[in-house]
Amino acid sequence: MGLVCGILLALANGMLLVIVKAGPDLIFHKEVQLSTEQQIQKAPRLVQPFLEWAASHLPTSIQASSNAVLLAIILSIPVVMFLRSLFSYLNVYLVNWASTRAMADLRTAVFGHLQNLPLSFFSQANTGDLIARVSIDTQSLRLVVGSSIATLVSDPFTILMVVAMLLSMQPVLTLFSLVVLPVCIVPISIYARKVRQSARAMQSHTADLSKVMHEAFTGNRIIKAYNMEDKVLAEFRQVTNKFVNQTMRVIRANEIPGNVTEFLGGLGVTLILLYIAFAKTSFRDVGNFSAFLFGMFSMYKPIKNLTKLHNQFHQANAASQRVFELLDTPSSMPEPASPKPLAAANANIQFDDVYFSYGEKPVLRGINLTIKAGQFVALVGTTGSGKTSLVNLLLRFYDVQSGAVLIGGLDVREVSIKDLRRQIAIVTQESILFHDTIRKNIAVGRPDATDQEIEAAARHANAHEFIMQKEGGYEAIVGEKGTTLSGGQKQRVSIARAIVKDAPILILDEATNSLDAEVEHAVQEELEKLMRGRTTICIAHRLATVQKADRIVVLSEGRIVETGTHAELLEQGGVYQRLYELQFQSQK
């Protein structure tokens, strides 16, 4: 539709040129008092059918007058101008509508692709850079593409229409005036290279700005505690200045070629006038000469726009390259082609000769472990022993390099990731809450949970009392990452979230670490109720929380070194006993 409007706009420009040519001809022949038929024959052929139609529809008294065609010409001016304005508006509006929708779809596709990338990607990616690519780069691409396509659709047709009419009126002078156009390629090619370099740098600096802002906003507590405000501001000012410098380079590279082209166009018109003056050429046809000059000057703007088009495409290429790099990033954990259904309830969990490493650093070495359905198994060990990595493999945040993780005899790589994680509830040491109400944060795992279920879960997590003390109760906004709640309150909301999800497998990763002794004792009792009938894996540093575990697995340097109950491991006098004694002595 935008293409049609662009063609119609070019036709309207051509009609305007015809009127400029025909009007003066008829006005200057008015003294001769030509008949209506003679005046129509005097007009350009392109406009003659319109004049005949207009003259035939005028009142009879006007048709008899020789001014009929002249009146039709005059009245057609506002009509053509209205059509020209209408098609110009529709051309820009429709092209930008199409580009906006296309960029919205692209932004959604990029964001959706990022959501499906594994945790390993986000552990290495820069959050500010990702935000810039999804939001700012796609917006820059939309602005460039929208303006470029509008120019690409209408302006070439306008130039071709005007040049064709000029050649029909004055072929020699038209060719003579257009001889300077090849020279316009020189500044375009020179500044195109500058645009390529500056556009890439500008997009990079935009990502740096997003990075600085993201870190400043999310780490504001530390910035204030260490008096880093001036340092962060200086870094932001430095990146901003780099961005401004590259932006101005792009603006210069976009504007200079167009103005050089306009100057060369004026030089071409000057050559025409010199030719007319020194060649003793006279123009008796005033309308023809007026239309010729009007046509020459009417080409300036579209030619100037087209000179910018090449540079704008380089800007679009710089923005799109960063966006499509994300889309081309493959997932290291693809979904199975034919996923098998998973029934985690009453199913054993098995780690079969599992090897795993982060890059070149080995984390798990030959892990063989079976967790029976409904069993409470605790994973203990020093920091870096591989406890959290086992849980990450079970949730399929990562995939094993060797071996397999099975639930009910089914490899988790053969199961849909959504189906797998739907049947696992997790409470992590770092409680992540969303900038939303307490109610919605509790219902994350089950959006369809009733108010009664949410409140019951909060009571079990010992959270109902402090929630009701908040203004708005369950409708209170927790702030970004739960900033309006204390660490213990956030932890209790996370526990309530796991209770509401009601999954057959429960993972507790230092679930009570942020709670004081009194609240921890109350919550621990509720967690014990929650664990009944569920397969529970508990990661713990405080060994007092795992003494009731059916089985304790002790890891060291990625290997299982001991297994047994609390009493059995103390009798063995191994790693577990040393860890227990160290904690017991530190608590005295």
Image (cartoon, helix red, strand yellow):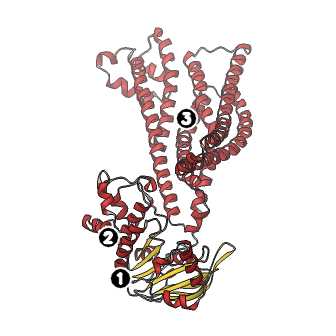
Residue 24 image position (x, y, % from top left): 51, 16
Q: How many residues crowd around disc 3 within 10 Å: few (fewer than 14), some, or many (20 or more)?
A: many
- Spot the residue most to the top: 31
Q: How many residues crowd around disc 1 within 10 Å: few (fewer than 14), some, or many (20 or more)?
A: few
Residue 295 image position (x, y, % from top left): 58, 26
Figure check: 531 above or below 91: below
Residue bearing the label numbered 1: 532
Q: Is residue 430 left or right of residue 459?
A: right
Q: Which residue is drawn at the image coordinates 41% and 28% (left, top)? A: 82
- Lower position in the chain sequence, tag 3 or tag 1: 3
Number of marks drawn = 3
> Please, what is the three-letter code of the amino acid marked with disc 3?
Thr
- The picture quadrant where one finds residue 202 is top right
Q: Which mark, residue 278? A: none
Residue bearing the label numbered 2: 460
Nearer to us of marks 3 and 1 is 1
> Please, what is the three-letter code of the amino acid marked with disc 2?
His
Residue bearing the label numbered 3: 158
Residue 131 image position (x, y, % from top left): 54, 52
Figure check: 355 above or below 281: below
Looking at this view, is 374 or 239 the one in front?
374
Looking at this view, is 170 or 476 the one in front?
476
Is label 3 in a helix, a strand or a loop?
Answer: helix
Real-space Cα separation, disc 2 to disc 1, in angstroms: 14 Å
Nearer to us of marks 3 and 2 is 2
Q: Which residue is drawn at the image coordinates 52% and 51% (left, top)? A: 218
Real-space Cα separation, disc 3 to disc 2, in angstroms: 73 Å
